[in-house]
Image (cartoon, helix red, strand yellow):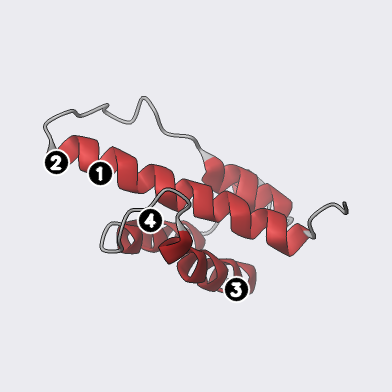
Amino acid sequence: MSLPSKKELITRIILQDLKHNQLIKSLRDLGFDDSGVYSLDLLSIVASLLGIPEEKLSEHWVATYQNLMDKSTSLPISDLGTELRELAEEGYHLLESC
């Protein structure tokens, strides 16, 4: 079994963040607000893997990442997050080109 490529690893991390974002949004809709306590901060990990130091993150890059999270809430929720895979791949390409 080989290790995933850097692109695949980043895409998987984005996918998991999208899925987590769906959970947090659903909980908020039910009246449970965590006030950001359960934020995973995967944004900085993705940036790091793309070679972008945290202090050099542009507002555009952060907004692009947040837009992905916002889009995830309109997609169906599933165990494996398969509906999110395409969005995660799109996100990888958008973030890489920022």
Viewer-nearest residue: 30 or 10: 30
Q: Amino acid at mark 4?
A: Met
Q: CA distance from mark 2 to mark 3?
A: 30 Å
Q: CA distance from mark 4 to mark 3?
A: 15 Å
Q: Amino acid at mark 1?
A: Lys
Q: CA distance from mark 2 to mark 4?
A: 16 Å
Q: Which residue is mark 3?
A: 93
Question: Which residue occupies 88% across, 54% down?
Answer: 2
Q: CA distance from mark 1 to mark 2?
A: 6 Å
Q: Nearer the viewer, mark 2 or mark 3?
A: 2
Quadrant in the rendering for residue 92: bottom right
- What percent of the width, then of the height, locates residue 31? 11, 31
Q: Which residue is mark 1?
A: 25
Q: Amino acid at mark 2?
A: Asp
Which mark is on residue 9? none
Label 1: how many residues lie within 10 Å, few (<14), some (14-19) or many (20+)? some
Q: Which residue is mark 4?
A: 69
Quadrant in the rendering for residue 69: bottom left
Q: Which residue is mark 2?
A: 29
Question: Which residue occupies 26% across, 28% down?
Answer: 35
Q: CA distance from mark 3 to mark 1?
A: 25 Å
